Amino acid sequence: LPLDTDEKRAVLAGLGSVPDKRALAVVAPLMDDPGVQPEAAAAVVRIAQSISSARDPETVDALKKVVTLASITPETRKAAQDSLKAMQ
């Protein structure tokens, strides 16, 4: 059963607070959905900031993608940049 945009936003709001790589694996692909891209990017940042294995390639790649998105807020972009700097 496909989810509509509001349902995707609800899922992203919940998963954004789950400190687990599996949550990141579910959320990151949603950055390709223009309808929920800002919410997905914000969720990626929140998850990346909360997981202890944040230096893994999947997390770094997801954060790098957040930085490139045009539809996100300046705050989300800065949080992603700050997270990437903290991983170096």
Image (tube, grey):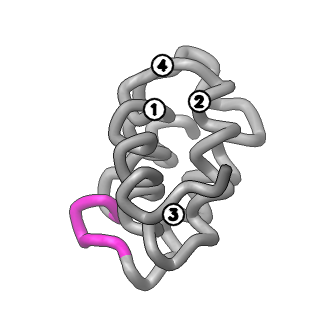
The answer to which of marks 2 and 1 sits earlier in the sequence is 1
Place of residue 33 in the rendered image (x, y in percent of width and height, measured from the top left): 58, 71
Instruction: Name the secondary structure under disc 4.
Output: loop
Q: CA distance from mark 4 to mark 2?
A: 7 Å
As drawn, which residue projects farthest toward the right?
57
- Is 78 placed left or right of 3 in the picture? left
Q: CA distance from mark 2 to mark 1?
A: 6 Å
Q: Residue at x 45, y 58 (%)?
A: 41
**Is disc 3 surrounded by few (<14), some (14 to 19) or many (20+) residues within 10 Å?**
many
Place of residue 21 in the rendered image (x, y in percent of width and height, measured from the top left): 65, 25
Q: Is residue 77 above or below residue 8?
A: below
- Is 37 placed left or right of 60 in the picture? left
Q: Are marks 2 and 1 in contact (CB under 8 Å)?
A: yes
As drawn, which residue projects farthest toward the top?
52
Place of residue 45 in the rendered image (x, y in percent of width and height, measured from the top left): 42, 45
Q: Is residue 11 above or below residue 30?
A: above
Name the residue that disc number 1 marks.
15
**Is disc 2 surrounded by few (<14), some (14 to 19) or many (20+) residues within 10 Å?**
some
Name the residue that disc number 4 marks.
19
Q: Which residues, given as a range, are shown in magenta?
A: 72-77
Q: Amino acid at mark 2?
A: Ala
Q: Please state which of the two labelled residues, at mark 1 or mark 3, is closer to the viewer.
A: 1
